[in-house]
Image (spheres, rainbow, N blue to C red):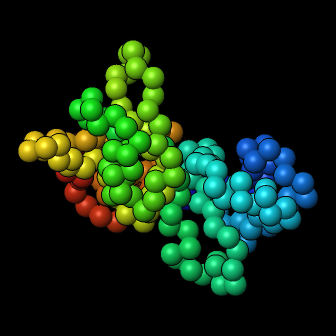
């Protein structure tokens, strides 16, 4: 679990059991503070769980990876997690899956692009399910070149877990941030 709060074994086990659709013979082993091993015997269940998400419990992000020897000591093993990201301020003719994949290239990987139905009060935007590096600050947006014109496409993170408004990194708050100052671009 990526966050400041200590997650308890029972809470994590209850959450994953329900969220993952009651996989048969699921075992949860607590390895340390906010570190758990999930034993899922069924390969199809394991793949479905790894490809699913985001898994957010109590405003903390559950970052998953396939098990390998030494994973608990590998800092890079738990840096990628899926998040839903809305992309705003795009021209109408850029509302496509291809444009979403191109814009999403600022993230590690785009798993899915959705074009929400129009007519809602929230306006026109794309939604990306992207693998985000949790060790880096959350991006506020990116510059998109449309013909000869450049536009700022802003990002809004859905069900975003706790993150620091000083440095933009998921997993801690401003109170415990080791960096001083604030992010450029505002809240």
Q: What residue lies at 50% left-to-right and 67% top-to-bottom?
A: 79
**Viewer-side residue, 39 vs 35:** 39
Q: Quadrant of residue 88?
A: top left
Q: Position of residue 30 (x, y in %)?
A: 76, 67
> Can you say whether 105 is above or below 21 in the image?
below
User: Going 40% across and 20% down the picture, which residue do you hit?
Assistant: 118
In front: 133, or 94? 94
| Horizontal side, residue 184 vs residue 77: left or right | left
Task: Looking at this view, name the residue that lies furthest to the bottom.
Answer: 70
Q: In this picture, is 124 found above or below 37?
A: above
Q: Is residue 139 visible?
A: yes
**Residue 18 placement (x, y as % from top left):** 78, 43
Left or right, residue 156 beside residue 180: right
Figure quadrant of the N terminus: bottom right
Report the residue at 71% width, 60% height from top: 47
Question: What percent of the width, then of the height, locates residue 104?
Answer: 37, 52
Dividing the picture into quarters, in which one does residue 167 lie?
bottom left
The number of numbered badges drawn on the structure is 0
**Left/right of residue 67 with respect to residue 109 in the rendered view:** right
Question: Is residue 14 shown to the viewer in this render?
Answer: no
Please tell me which residue is depicted at 64% across the width and 77% down the height of the picture: 72
Residue 114 percent coordinates (x, y): 47, 37
Q: Going by the picture, which residue comes out furthest to the left? A: 148
Instruction: Say which quadrant the C terminus sits in.
Output: top left
Compared to residue 95, the image places residue 46 above or below, namely below
68 left or right of 152?
A: right
């Amino acid at each position: 679990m990526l966050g400041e709060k200590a997650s308890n074994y029972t809470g994590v086990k209850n959450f994953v059991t329900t969220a993952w659709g009651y996989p048969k013979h699921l075992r949860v082993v607590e390895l340390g503070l906010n570190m758990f091993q999930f034993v899922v015997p069924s390969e199809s269940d394991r793949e479905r769980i790894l490809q699913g998400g985001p898994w957010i419990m109590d405003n903390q992000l559950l970052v998953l990876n396939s098990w390998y020897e030494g994973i608990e000591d590998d800092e890079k093993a738990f840096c990628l997690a899926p998040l839903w990201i809305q992309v705003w301020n795009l021209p109408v003719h850029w509302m496509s899956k291809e444009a979403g994949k191109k814009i999403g290239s600022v993230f590690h990987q785009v798993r899915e692009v959705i074009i929400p139905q129009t007519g809602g009060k929230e306006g026109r935007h794309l939604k990306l399910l992207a693998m985000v590096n949790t060790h880096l600050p959350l991006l506020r947006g990116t510059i998109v070149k449309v013909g000869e014109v450049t536009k700022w496409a802003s990002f809004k993170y859905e069900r975003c877990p706790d993150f620091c408004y000083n440095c933009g990194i998921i997993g801690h708050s401003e109170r415990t941030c080791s960096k001083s100052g604030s992010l450029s671009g505002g809240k």
